[in-house]
Image (spheres, rainbow, N blue to C red):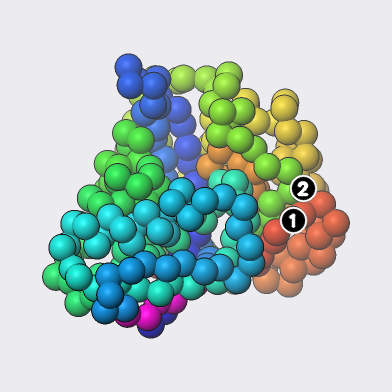
Amino acid sequence: MKEYAPAKINLFLDVIRKREDGYHDLGTLFQTIDAGDTVSAEIREDGRITLCYNEPQDYPLESDLVFKAAKLLQAESGTVMGADIFLEKVMPLGAGLGGGSADAAATLRLLSRLWNLPFPAEKLEELGARLGADVPFLVRGGTAFAEGIGEKLSFLEPLQLPGEACLLVATPLDSVPTRDAYAGVPKSGPDRWESFKANFTKSGRSVFDFVFENGFNAFEESVFPKHPLVDEMKLKMVQLGAKFTLMSGSGASVFGVFETPERAKQAADELKPLSRYQVVTRFFRGF
């Protein structure tokens, strides 16, 4: 049995405040894209959970989000079943695309089917919140506003790129530790986020014009000075004809919207020497 694990981008991302628990309240517009990893599993009757990748990993199994998701679902459901899990990893690590979180979300969906568990999406989202901030959204995917640390979700009608427009998503030859992104990021308060939400809802058919004019990522201010390759990637996309471009999450990936697949692929060829990962894609509507 297999499950697709589509990645996400952020069409808007603001840091509202730092909380007393050390986390940050965010406001973001999430969107899944049609690019990602694939999780496969076969049932085991001895209760064991194993995990293998298509390429070696350099961290302990117990810290892997896929393994954690499987163990959490097993414990929460009380099932005596186990699973042999295989992860076909495509998305780069530490790229701001939610790859690890998408894998965890896919594991929750997959094992709930494999083990025949009566858990609705809302229950899987609740479990996902224990694993990471992006996991609850990625259980369902599509388009959503997210607040708090990402666990407060308001799902929207799925967005579709206009006409033949495509995304080019590229990860520069760099990675951005989360601490780098949060160090020096401005905390803007709620006004910009509340204004974006309200005007997005009113924008109707001109939603893409609105997003292209108002798309924003507060982390660009803290990331670009320390990681000039990310800044360079965004500038290059603009020079190559992107109608809209933005860093995703806390970096390092950048995405640009191009009018046609041909233009996106031409830009991808130009950017290949500067990238450790790239894909031309469209939005993913969700599950």
Q: Residue at x 81, y 56 (%)?
A: 271
Residue 52 position within the rendered picture, expressed as x and y whole percent measured from the top left? 52, 69
- In the displayed orientation, state which residue is furthest to the front: 46
Closer to the chain start, of discs 1 and 2, is 2
* Left or right, 252 with reference to 7: right
Question: Camera-side residue: 46 or 1?
Answer: 46
Question: Camera-side residue: 219 or 125?
Answer: 125
Decide: is 21 above or below 68. above
Question: Camera-side residue: 201 or 40?
Answer: 40
Decide: is 212 above or below 116. above
Residue under label 2: 173
> Is mark 1 in CB contact (under 8 Å) with mark 2?
yes
Q: Which residues are magenta?
A: 38-43
Q: Identify the secondary structure beneath mark 2.
A: loop
Q: Residue at x 71, y 65 (%)?
A: 264
Decide: is 16 above or below 162. above
- The image quadrant where one finds the C terminus is bottom left
Q: Is residue 263 visible?
A: no
- Which residue type carries mark 1? Arg
Number of the label disc, if any, that sits on residue 148? none
Alpha carbon distance from label 1 to label 2: 5 Å
Q: Residues within 10 Å of mark 1 (few under 14, many from 20)?
A: some
Q: Is residue 274 visible?
A: yes
Magenta region, main secondary structure: strand
Q: Residue at x 48, y 55 (%)?
A: 61
Quarter of the rendering containing residue 158: bottom left
* Left or right, 186 with reference to 158: right
Residue 76 among those drawn in magenta: no
Residue under label 1: 276
